[in-house]
Every structure is written in structure tokens, then in C-alpha cells.
């Protein structure tokens, strides 16, 4: 179990929102804000620098609607490049396409900006534990509108892509997959991209769930 405060990185294009979130989170005993960014691209660069320095955040609190690189795109990039990090999406809107897009991109939670402060903290803690936290309004919307995608034929995958898919389902990063299969990280990344395209899914998480559902990879052990 992870020790110490939850390291949070805040992404929002509104200065007032960022300052408000920072002020609240820094008042919570088990929270620590380690950085903030105004858009997705800045977030990717700053998070990469923190990871390279050995000081990665645990949870990224991500606004979805921003100029430049939006939050859904940034979430997908973060969960692909840094699968050990959790992203909690946060927005003022409840459109189905935003909800689905964020979750398909790998978000570990979805909050509305009018959420109570305690709920924000609860979502961040849940994300670090590897759990999914959804705003009650979002949860209701999903039960009405979220339809599981049609299973895609795994026969479209090559033998090597199947090997890579099993490792993706085990939670390995591109570099770890490369090390396991004795290939370059670039080749591993290309295999993962091809797998997502062939399976018709938008994220590694979706690919892993499909692999488990179809029996290609074992389900993780219960904790």
C-alpha cells in the first residue's frame, strides 16, 4: 500500500479554478499538489519532467474542455505513456460524448466541477487505490446510455500482437513490453497502436478488458 500524501497534478485553463483546487488540496492532510498546467500539452511536458526526476504525481486532476490539447486527448496520452498514473476527469458538462471519451481514454474517475470538496478528495484517493469514482449524476447517465462495444475479432491480431496484448492486460508499459519481448520500445509502441486500431478501442484499458473478456488474458487476482 502506498504511503505518504497523494501527489496531485492539476490541469485547468482557468487560473481561478487551478488556484482554488490547489488551495483546497493543500489544506487536506493527505494531499500534496506537485504541479499544475493550463492545457494538455503543458501537462504532458511537465508530468514527463516530474517522472524523469523520479517525482511523479500519483493522480492527475484533468479538466476536459481546454484550448489546444483537450483533456480527453491528454488523458489518453498520459495513460499510455505513464500507465502507473491515474487521471480523474473534471468538467462542468455532462455530455455523453465527454463522459465516454474520458473513460475510454483511461480516466479513473469523472467529477463535475460543482462537486463538493470532500467528493473531490474521495475521487483522488480512490484513483490512487486503483478504483474508479464517478459523480452520481454521471453514474446515472452511464447506466442509461453506456453500451458496451461489440466484441472485435481477435483473429485480426498477429501472433506477436497477441503476445503484446497479453502484456498490456497485465498492466505493462511500452518499455516493459519491449524488455519482455526483446524488442525496441518504438516497436512495442507501434504494436500497441496497431492493436487498439484493430480492436476498435480507444485505450489500453479497453484493450485489456476486451482481452480478459475474450479469454486471451487472465483476469487480475482479487485483492
Image: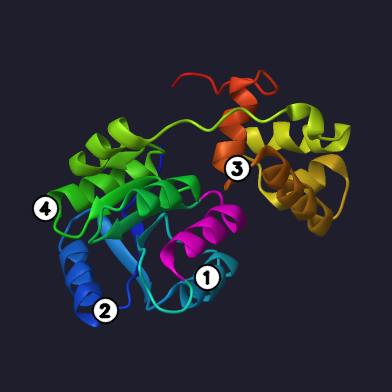
Task: Say whether residue 209 is left or right of residue 158.
Answer: left
Q: Main secondary structure of the magenta part?
A: helix
Would you call the spot at circle 1 few (<14 residues within 10 Å), some (14-19), or many (20 or more)?
some
Secondary structure of the residue carrying tag 4 is loop
Q: Give the Cα separation between the discs numbered 4 and 2.
A: 19 Å
Mark before the other along the chain sequence, 3 or 4: 4
Tell me the residue at 68%/38% (across/down). 199
Residues marked 4 and 2 touching at CB (< 8 Å) = no
Task: Count residues near mark 4 (Cα–Cα under 10 Å), then give few for <14, some for 14-19, many for 20+.
Answer: few
Q: Earlier in the sequence, mark 4 or mark 2?
A: 2
Q: Quadrant of residue 81?
A: bottom right
The residue that label 3 is drawn on is 201
Point 21% across, 73% down: residue: 17
Q: Which mark is residue 44?
A: 1
Whole-angstrom CA distance, mark 3 to mark 2, is 31 Å
Label whose residue precedes the other's in the sequence (1 or 2): 2
Q: Which residue is mark 4?
A: 116
Q: Is residue 7 above or below residue 155?
A: below
Q: Position of residue 147 (x, y in %)?
A: 43, 32
Q: Secondary structure at mark 2?
A: loop
> How far is the residue under mark 1 from the one under mark 2?
18 Å
The residue pinned by badge 2 equals 14
* Residue 170 visible in rendering: no
* Residue contact between numbered discs 1 and 3, judged by CB atoms under 8 Å: no
Q: Position of residue 142 (x, y in %)?
A: 31, 36
Residue at 19% across, 39% down: 136
The one nearer the camera, 55 or 173, is: 173
Amino acid at each position: 500500500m502506498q504511503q505518504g500524501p497523494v501527489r496531485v497534478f492539476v490541469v485547468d485553463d482557468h487560473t481561478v479554478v487551478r488556484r482554488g483546487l490547489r488551495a483546497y488540496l493543500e489544506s487536506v492532510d493527505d494531499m500534496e499538489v506537485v504541479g499544475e498546467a493550463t492545457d494538455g500539452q503543458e501537462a504532458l511536458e511537465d508530468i514527463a519532467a516530474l517522472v524523469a526526476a523520479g517525482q511523479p504525481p500519483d493522480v492527475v486532476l484533468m479538466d476536459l474542455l481546454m484550448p489546444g490539447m483537450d483533456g480527453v486527448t491528454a488523458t489518453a496520452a498520459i495513460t499510455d505513456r505513464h500507465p502507473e498514473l491515474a487521471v480523474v476527469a473534471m468538467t462542468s458538462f455532462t455530455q455523453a460524448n465527454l463522459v465516454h471519451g474520458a473513460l475510454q481514454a483511461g480516466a479513473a474517475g469523472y467529477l463535475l466541477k460543482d462537486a463538493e470538496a470532500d467528493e473531490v478528495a474521495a475521487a483522488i484517493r480512490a484513483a490512487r487505490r486503483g478504483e474508479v469514482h464517478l459523480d452520481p449524476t454521471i453514474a446515472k447517465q452511464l447506466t442509461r446510455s453506456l453500451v458496451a462495444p461489440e466484441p472485435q475479432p481477435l483473429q485480426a491480431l498477429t501472433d506477436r500482437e497477441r503476445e503484446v496484448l497479453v502484456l498490456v492486460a497485465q498492466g505493462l508499459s511500452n518499455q516493459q513490453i519491449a524488455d519482455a519481448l526483446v524488442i525496441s520500445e518504438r516497436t512495442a509502441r507501434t504494436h500497441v497502436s496497431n492493436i487498439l486500431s484493430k480492436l476498435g478501442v480507444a485505450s489500453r484499458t479497453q484493450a485489456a478488458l476486451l482481452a480478459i473478456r475474450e479469454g486471451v488474458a487472465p483476469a487480475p487476482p482479487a485483492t
